[in-house]
Amino acid sequence: MRLSPVRHCAILVILIGVTLAVEVPFTPGLQTFILDMHNEMREKQHGSNMNELEWDDTLAQEALDWISSCTFEHQMKGRGENLAFNTDESSNEELITKSMDDWYSEIQYFRYGNKSCSQDCHFSQLVWADTRKVGCAMVRCPAFHVPWDPATTIPNAWYIGCFYDPKGNDYGVFPWLKGKPCSHCLKGQTCSLQGLCHGEGVIPCVNIESTDHCNYWYEVKECDTNPKFMHKFCRKSCKLCTPEPGEEGEGEHSEPCEDMSKYAQMRHNGRLACEIWKENNQCETNPFLRTACKKTCGFC
């Protein structure tokens, strides 16, 4: 029997419909649940600049729009992203916990000193200190797709996506700073009971790295060639801010006219290194000496 055009269209709509994602609402209780898990994992790192995460509805909607495709792949458009899927018929709390634990378990691939992870980097996004906001979404996918096996469709998959802002996993940057919790919070932030930096805050006009190092890197143009690191750790030397009242005493012109580097105090045959470097005409050719030997070289 030949189908009429109207009936054929109706069947086509039904067939298409069964492949669409079904949103699993992130109730206020589930929002609090996953937010608390994030901040508990961040607390474990004992970072001196670790921000407390807050829920963000805009990020949650972006995550929902993305994962509704029911395809396991990252968007890669300026947001931090953690994704997971599961085919268990467990409660949402159990599935969220399993996903979060799987992300955190990737700590085994992370090396703080190398500022990198050897495999997946879900863990480092979880604990990226500068990140302040997170929004997550969940869907049920009648037909779920994974790019590593395009011929296979996974039925009835639970799929979660969390988007983060600012995003983490910047190459060559420490995900958090070690030290006393909250000792490197931004100005205006308070310290939560968990030892996390709470609130927006203002980035202070200081160098987190040593001034002589930051000034040297400034001289060799690192502010332009390595901005992610320099704009975070050497803001003052890169002239990215104006000192507020009370900070003027830390300005360049108020620093003592002394040779600043520990290397400048080294001696060779009884003579200071700065004196030797000056005699070898290093003052004008080596930007490092503008701070390391500024007195000997006559830069102050």
Image: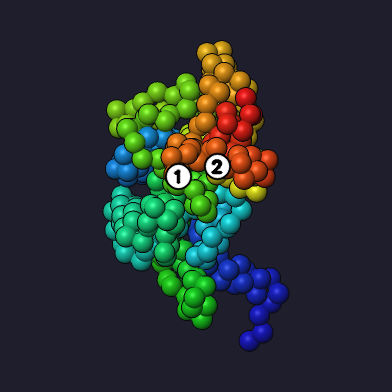
* Residue shown at 56% from the left, 71% from the top: 15
Give the quarter of the image for residue 218. top right
Q: Secondary structure at mark 1?
A: strand
Q: Quadrant of the C terminus?
A: top right
Q: What percent of the width, then of the height, locates residue 203? A: 53, 28
Q: Quadrant of the N terminus?
A: bottom right
* In front of the other: 132 or 49: 49
Q: Which residue is mark 1?
A: 268
Q: Secondary structure at mark 2?
A: helix
For residue 276, which numbered disc appears in the image? Answer: 2
Please identify the residue farthest to the front as the structure is shown: 269
Mark 1–mark 2 Cα distance, whole angstroms, equals: 8 Å
* Within-10-Å neighbours for mark 2: few <14, some 14–19, many 20+: some
* In front of the other: 119 or 14: 119
* Residue shown at 51% from the left, 81% from the top: 151
* Mark 1 residue type: His
* In front of the other: 31 or 141: 31
